[in-house]
Image (cartoon, rainbow, N blue to C red):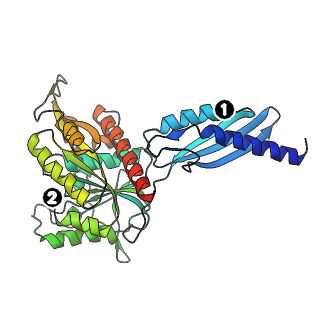
């Protein structure tokens, strides 16, 4: 067979492979993987008994909850094409960046984590979500923007002061994740007395004056309630989406609904509601007691029309891990609670990808 015939044969095989892949669709984008631009490389190598195919699929996030589905279906479809002898399949993820003046250079998406009231475990959820995204292969940074009550330094076991190089603050790294917190600059044991605009300015400086590396996600732990820090974040950067944390009790849910309303007024997509402290897990018998009730956040999410991201139990493992500076996701990745956070992070990444795609449509 001459070179022209070989080229024509390979072109036909390439077309057949792409046509087969068009059967594989992203259910949320309502597009097949070819039309959505997920196919980034398709190489053919001819052998006597057929072609070896090298295929790269690039999903919208390394933490895609449908990653295994895309991988198995793509393999099934391509290997079923006549003329394919073998397949080398690579599945990667690239987080879609925002556009406009408010985008942070080198940071694809900013994910805010907030709560209508304090004491619901918002910071613990935010930190473990960030570490879960890191475990999924994403490049993640963490900003503790709770200026009045920063807790990230304790939960991560950080004591070192950030270095300053050429006028830029260098983030402190914990568990492979660059972090920044106002706690690094506040004297230990002293109250932070800042007026509202000062708090907002402090957060803006930690966003703009810190030498953040290239990141897929910057997870921002916001103060409880609605106030100047939230407004400062909104005006300073493009926020891809927000996660709201609540306990199951009615009082907390009432405040959580206000937080959701605030993000909606800012036109920040609400990625979902988390029910934290959803049942106390006895460390001895592992039985559960619904101290704050159960299921309230899921019902509230349905009422407000936002995704429900899942329940996190009140487990002493989480408390001890945070107090010891060893978050459960990083120190005990096989623990049941760590797996809950991991699954939740996939939902967050997925919802952020969908929100960003809808903005670009």
* Distance (Cα) linking label 1 and label 2: 55 Å
The residue labelled by disc 2 is 149
| Whole-percent x, y for residue 21 in the image | 61, 39
Image position of 197 with respect to 270: above or below: below
Mark closer to the chain start, 1 or 2:
1
Are there few (<14), some (14-19), or many (20+) residues within 10 Å of tag 1?
Answer: some
Q: Nearer the viewer, residue 34 or 207?
A: 34
Image quadrant in which you'd find residue 228: bottom left
Relative side of 203 to 253, left or right: right
| Whole-percent x, y for residue 45 in the image | 76, 42
The residue labelled by disc 1 is 79
Q: Are marks 1 and 2 in contact (CB under 8 Å)?
A: no
Image position of 76 with respect to 195: above or below: above
Relative side of 297 to 337, left or right: left
| Whole-percent x, y for residue 92 in the image | 53, 47
Can residue 324 be seen from the camera position used here?
A: no
**Residue drawn at point x = 22 percent, y = 72 percent:** 201
**Residue drawn at point x = 42 percent, y = 39 percent:** 65
Identify the secondary structure beneath mark 2.
loop
Looking at the rendered image, the quarter that the N terminus falls into is top right
Image position of 191 with respect to 88: above or below: below
Relative side of 303 to 346, left or right: left
């Amino acid at each position: 067979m001459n070179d022209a015939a070989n080229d024509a044969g390979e072109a036909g095989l390439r077309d057949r492979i792409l046509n087969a892949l068009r059967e594989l669709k992203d259910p949320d984008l309502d597009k097949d993987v070819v039309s959505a631009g997920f196919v980034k490389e398709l190489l053919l190598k001819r052998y006597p008994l057929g072609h070896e195919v090298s295929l790269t699929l690039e999903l919208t996030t390394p933490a895609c909850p449908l990653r295994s589905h895309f991988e198995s279906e793509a393999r099934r479809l391509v290997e079923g094409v006549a003329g394919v002898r073998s397949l080398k399949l690579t599945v990667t993820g690239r987080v879609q960046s925002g556009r406009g003046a408010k985008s942070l250079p080198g940071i694809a998406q900013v994910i805010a984590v907030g709560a209508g009231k304090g004491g619901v475990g918002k910071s613990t959820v935010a930190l473990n979500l960030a570490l879960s995204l890191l475990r999924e292969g994403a490049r993640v940074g963490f900003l503790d923007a709770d200026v009045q009550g920063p807790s990230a330094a304790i939960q991560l076991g950080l004591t070192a002061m950030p270095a300053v190089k050429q006028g830029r603050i260098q983030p402190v790294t914990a568990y492979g994740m660059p972090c920044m917190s106002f706690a690094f600059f506040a004297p230990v044991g002293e109250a932070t007395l800042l007026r509202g605009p000062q708090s907002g300015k402090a957060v803006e400086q930690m966003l703009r004056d810190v030498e953040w590396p290239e990141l897929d996600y910057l997870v921002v732990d916001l103060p409880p309630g609605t106030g100047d820090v939230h407004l400062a974040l909104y005006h300073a950067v493009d926020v891809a989406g927000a996660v709201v944390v609540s306990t199951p009790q009615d009082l907390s849910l009432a405040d959580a609904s206000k937080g959701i309303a605030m993000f909606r007024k800012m036109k920040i997509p609400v990625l979902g509601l988390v029910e934290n402290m959803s049942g106390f897990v006895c460390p001895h018998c592992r039985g559960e007691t619904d101290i704050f009730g159960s299921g309230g956040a899921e019902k509230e999410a349905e009422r407000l029309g936002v995704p429900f991201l899942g329940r996190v139990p009140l487990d002493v493992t989480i408390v001890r891990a945070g107090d010891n500076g060893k978050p459960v996701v990083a120190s005990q990745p096989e623990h049941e609670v760590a797996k809950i956070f991991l699954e939740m992070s996939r939902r967050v990444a997925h919802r952020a990808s969908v929100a960003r795609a809808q903005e670009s449509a």
